[in-house]
Image: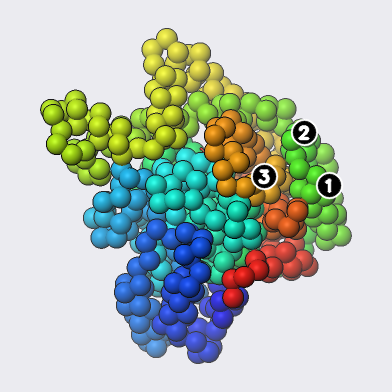
Amino acid sequence: MHDKTIAELSAALAGGDVTSLELVEAYLDRIRRLDASLNSFITVDADSARAAAREADARRQRGDAGPLTGIPIALKDIFCTEDLKTSCGSRMLDNFAPPYNAHVVAQFKAAGAVILGKTNMDEFAMGSSNEASVYGAVRNPWHRDAVPGGSSGGSAAAVAARLTPGATGTDTGGSIRQPAALCGISGLKPTYGRVSRYGMVAFASSLDQAGPMARSAEDLALMLEVMAGVDERDSTAADRPVPRYSEALGQSLDGLTIGLPKEFFGEGMDDGTREAVNAAVAEYERLGASIREVSLPSSHLAVPAYYVIAPAEASSNLSRFDGVRYGYRCQDPQGLDDMYKRSRGEGFGPEVKRRIMVGTYALSAGYYDAYYRKAQQVRRLIRDEFVQALAEVDVLMGPTAPTPAFDIGSKSEDPVQMYLSDIYTIAVNLAGLPAVSIPAGESGGRPVGLQLIGDYFDEGQLLNVADQFQRVTDYHKRAPAGID
Ligand code: GLN
């Protein structure tokens, strides 16, 4: 059973081949046996999962089941879950059990999905390797010495190891797509505003977006149908109908035009990654697509602009953690200043502190124009170039990450090298566009991800284009060794 996709499990539940309770017991058992060596979960919520599974089975008996009713999923530990610890990978929130559910969580519960637990992540979603978690690094199921990517590394590793058929992630600069690529699974960052951010711990609010992580594009479609939609508690959540993404799959790619941004195939790209991406492009030509080279000339400015804008927003968002209302408070504070300083000093890890310092600097009087305003101008240029390219082609295609999974410890001392892991993903967040990463082969025995970028709110086409590839290839079906 654990090798089945969400779509297959949904059919098995509907056909009465298995109950939700049986499925949940099977996944809980796998987590117990396999996660000690992966560290992909921070919290496993076994009792509530069993209760929710029984409820889902009863609902099915009543004839009131949808596609996700009874399907187990995991949530990145950035989504607030009522009465269940939501740590965001940080000591700051290690003691935090929110009084409410995030919008995405409420939507999954209403659909009858069963929450197995909360997955590990880089602290406050800042990172590309999952080494920056106070709960320790996550290991890549394909290669235990390698990182799973980040910041949604726990979700990616759990899906790859078949500890859950699907999981949520968040993507501020690549944190769904890059770990999906490094773990050989599929992951979608929706258009900014497609999914409500209510109840998602904020990192950089103009970039953050929640999305699904699973093994196939079809499963991403099923999850997105539940996650997407308007929500009055997030004014940036778009008031647009949510298409039945899963029903719009299966369309021919004849006549599709794919643009290859030449800046995505430059220096710094690993040879095996290049070969896998070129082979995928050739596969798309066989499927009827035509290929055209396009240019996004400001691409090289994306990482520098992001590392002004994202830390600036983070420094503001994280000012709420002051040791007063919730979260970590230091022992025996000697007055208010001491409490602020030590609570934040002890509660935040080194990468979060680095971002707060960079962001505070960039926003300070005298530097605002030189850094923050300039970065916003670059952001506009990047967006305009994407809009222009997408007026000429239907989707853009390239690698998700410049290299496959790197070894644990190999970049943790060099933040700039780490930041370059997102060189192909970050511009998409700055532009607010949707993009998906799907497995497209391997390099040196480690998975390679193919990135597809679409126009605003064009998730349906993106998922169809991804799904067509998965109908003729089996990269997304491959499982890491040693997880049975
Ligand atoms: N790796 C990037 C960063 O560290 C992106 C993180 C994310 O998308 N949450 O900021």
The residue closer to the viewer here, 348 or 151, is 348
- Residue density around tag 1, few if under 14, some if 14–19, many if 20 or more, within 10 Å: some
Point out the image quarter for the N terminus.
Answer: bottom right
Q: How far separated are the C-alphas under marks 2 and 3?
A: 13 Å
The residue closer to the viewer here, 15 or 269, is 269
Q: What amino acid is at disc 3?
A: Ala
- Residue 383, image x and y in percent? 61, 32
Residue occupying image coordinates x 72% and y 64%: 475
Residue occupying image coordinates x 40% and y 51%: 135
Decide if residue 459 is on the left or right side of residue 308. Answer: right
- Residue 423, image x and y in percent? 64, 36
Numbered mark located on residue 267 in the image? 2
Q: Which residue is mark 1?
A: 291
Disc nearest the viewer among 2 and 1: 2
Work out whether mark 2 precedes mark 1 in sequence or the reverse, and give the earlier one: 2
**Up/down of 162 relative to 463, above or below:** below
Residue occupying image coordinates x 26% and y 55%: 97
Ligand 1 within 8 Å of the CB at mark 3: no
Q: What amino acid is at disc 2?
A: Glu
- Residue 462, image x and y in percent? 66, 54
- Residue density around tag 2, few if under 14, some if 14–19, many if 20 or more, within 10 Å: few
Numbered mark located on residue 401 in the image? 3
Q: Kindly tell me whether residue 228 is visible in this rendering.
A: no
Q: Kindly tell me whether residue 317 is visible in this rendering.
A: yes
Decide if residue 55 is on the left or right side of residue 434. Answer: left
Work out whether mark 2 precedes mark 3 in sequence or the reverse, and give the earlier one: 2
